[in-house]
Image (cartoon, coloured by chain):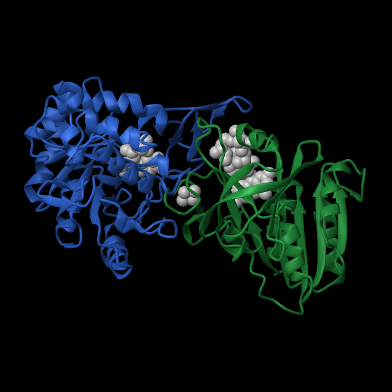
Amino acid sequence: MNKLNVNFLGINFDNPILTSSGCFGFGLEYKDYFNPNELGGIVLKGLTLEPRTGNIGTRIAETPSGILNCVGLENPGIDVLEKEIIPNLKKQGINTKIIVNINGSTVEQYVEIAKRVNEIKEIDMVELNISCPNVKDGGMAFGANPEVAGKTTREVRKVLNKPLIVKLSPNVTNIVEIAKIVEENGADAISMINTLLGMRIDINKGTPILGNTFGGLSGPAVRPVAVRMVYQVAQNVNIPIVGMGGINSWEDAVEFIMAGATMVSIGTGIFPNPLLPLEVKEGLNNYCIKNNLKNLQDIKGIAFKK
Amino acid sequence: MFLEDCVVLENNKISDSYYLLKLKGEKSISSAKPGQFYMLQCKNESTLLRRPISLHYINKEKQIIEFYYEVKGKGTNEFKNIKPGENINLQGPLGTGFNTDIENKNIVIIGGGMGMAPMKFLTEALSPKNNVTFICGGRNKESMNILDNFNLENIKTIITTDDGSLGIKGNVTIPLLETLKNKNIYKIYTCGPQIMMKHIMNIAKKNNILCEVSLEERMGCGVGACVGCSILTKEGMKKVCKDGPVFDSKIIIND
Ligand SMILES: Cc1cc2nc3c(=O)[nH]c(=O)nc-3n(C[C@H](O)[C@H](O)[C@H](O)COP(=O)(O)OP(=O)(O)OC[C@H]3O[C@@H](n4cnc5c(N)ncnc54)[C@H](O)[C@@H]3O)c2cc1C
Ligand SMILES: Cc1cc2nc3c(=O)[nH]c(=O)nc-3n(C[C@H](O)[C@H](O)[C@H](O)COP(=O)(O)O)c2cc1C
Ligand code: FES
């Protein structure tokens, strides 16, 4: 029996492992290393209505056990997603769940892109990104302001006919407050965390390393912050959580589930180790067997239930 | 594209901070082309990302794969200390390499500094069927030690050094312009410092010569998944790791 199988928002997932937006391209980039259908689902790179070229200059900088990125939502736009990317995914035999990460600079743009996504039947769910730290004209501003976060969620919920996950920013004073507000306004699930705002300076030049000065920190360096936030939010909302931030092993995934996450998502960890999702899957399965669990979900949230 | 643990055969200092790493490889070798690169894994867990390093040379029969690298920061310092017998994990071959599908042409290959790395495989791939002039630029005589590892039969090789300790004193554009005067050159292939490639692209453009350049950019994934290495070209955004690292100079914005 499949011990990893999970019902998430009414949809049956083979396992709780997703790959995070921005770290797994459009689903096929890692197909030489493993079959993407082994994943519970794929979250595609953040999309906007129109194509975006992203930020200029250096976009990646390594930090201790982490990376800073300021990609700035470079993406080909929703038209290319609909006409090329999705048909190609299907042609290549991808039948795992597809989650689209949507972005906008105004509430109207979020609503518009949500309507477009409705038309694409191959998309299983939507992740509303109100937490990108790398775009000046929107992104994090939506996720840091409770009122705007609530409004964006509400307006998108009104038009969207697919399950809605809202992705939260860790760059806030009170994450529980924002989580509750998006729940009240119709989010079906919460995903967290997006990257933490940071920067590095080139000490030879005396200038910021990243083209956009600031970037988002991800990787193992952020994991303790992410686990803490999932733990706090899980106790205060009634909707499921997709936990992410620095997952680098199956043990890390177990931490997130014990903190209250239903699903786990792998981002930066796949860069050094393209086989990480498979290793996590195998590790989680062995963990269930060793601990006599009928299903991995039996340990969900035990860190605060005990 | 493969992931493979490769045994280190040799890891020798060539000059001040330049090393030649020889590995035993199997899968990683089969399809590799000049100009492609590999992502080499660091063992220290806090050094999260793999390091992109160009393919220096492949010996398919002996299953040997070679890298020529400069010790710069954390990752390459770690590589320097790897001993024969130990393993290193390779991901690759990655990217699109040089186009070597040409015959009976006059060709100039220019490597500057670390840009000498991809040129061993490239000169050997092009020289049997073409007339190759190889221009090498470096700081000093020592920086040319790597040439001992090349097979330069039938290749006209010209050396330039900044300090004049070997070959022509000055940069690679001096012998390049000279060569263009004497021969009808069909194509230039180059890899090296940005400023050098900028001049070469200008010269190629002025003389209406095809030109392929190998670029560098910071990389996250190396496979086109993170768009960390994207650059703006005349044909829109291109990923250095996947659409490159070798590009037709025509599409590079060079100002
Ligand atoms: C396609 C490609 C091929 C390359 N081929 C070679 C080669 O054959 N030999 C060689 O010596 N070097 C090569 N480089 C450059 C090499 O990748 C860097 O020198 C190396 O990553 C530095 O790592 P570090 O840990 O020593 O330095 P650190 O400064 O500690 O590195 C920090 C981060 O910055 C990145 N980085 C630093 N410098 C560069 C750079 N110049 N280009 C890209 N990323 C960089 C590192 O990968 C790492 O993620 C190549 C780069 C690219 C993009
Ligand atoms: C290069 C890169 C690009 C990213 N792009 C997006 C994006 O487009 N949309 C989004 O919601 N999150 C994006 N993220 C954030 C990740 O999805 C994830 O929330 C974060 O990196 C933390 O997880 P990790 O530590 O496992 O990477 C990006 C992260 C990285 C490293
Ligand atoms: S390094 Fe990730 S897309 Fe090129």
What is the quadrant of residue B177 in the picture?
A: bottom right
Judging depth in this view, the residue of B50 and A205 nearest the camera is B50
Picture layout, residue A153 above or below residue A231: below
Picture layout, residue A76 above or below residue A17: below
Q: x and y percent of residue A262 in the render?
A: 19, 38
Picture layout, residue A306 above or below residue A255: above
Side (left or right) of B222 relative to A96: right
Judging depth in this view, the residue of B120 and B30 nearest the camera is B30
Q: Which chain is blue?
A: A
Residue at (25, 39) in percent of width and height: A288
Q: x and y percent of residue B109 in the render?
A: 76, 62
Q: x and y percent of residue B144 in the render?
A: 85, 48
Across the whole image, how many numbered discs are drawn on residues? 0
Judging depth in this view, the residue of B64 and A151 nearest the camera is B64
Q: x and y percent of residue A31 in the render?
A: 40, 59
What is the quadrant of residue A37 in the picture?
A: bottom left
Side (left or right) of B18 relative to A7: right
From this viewpoint, is residue A65 visible? yes
Q: Which chain is green?
A: B
From this viewpoint, is residue B240 visible? no
Q: Name the quarter showing ligand 2.
A: top left
What is the quadrant of residue A135 in the picture?
A: top left
Judging depth in this view, the residue of B244 and B172 nearest the camera is B244
Looking at the image, which residue sits at the far bottom?
Answer: B104
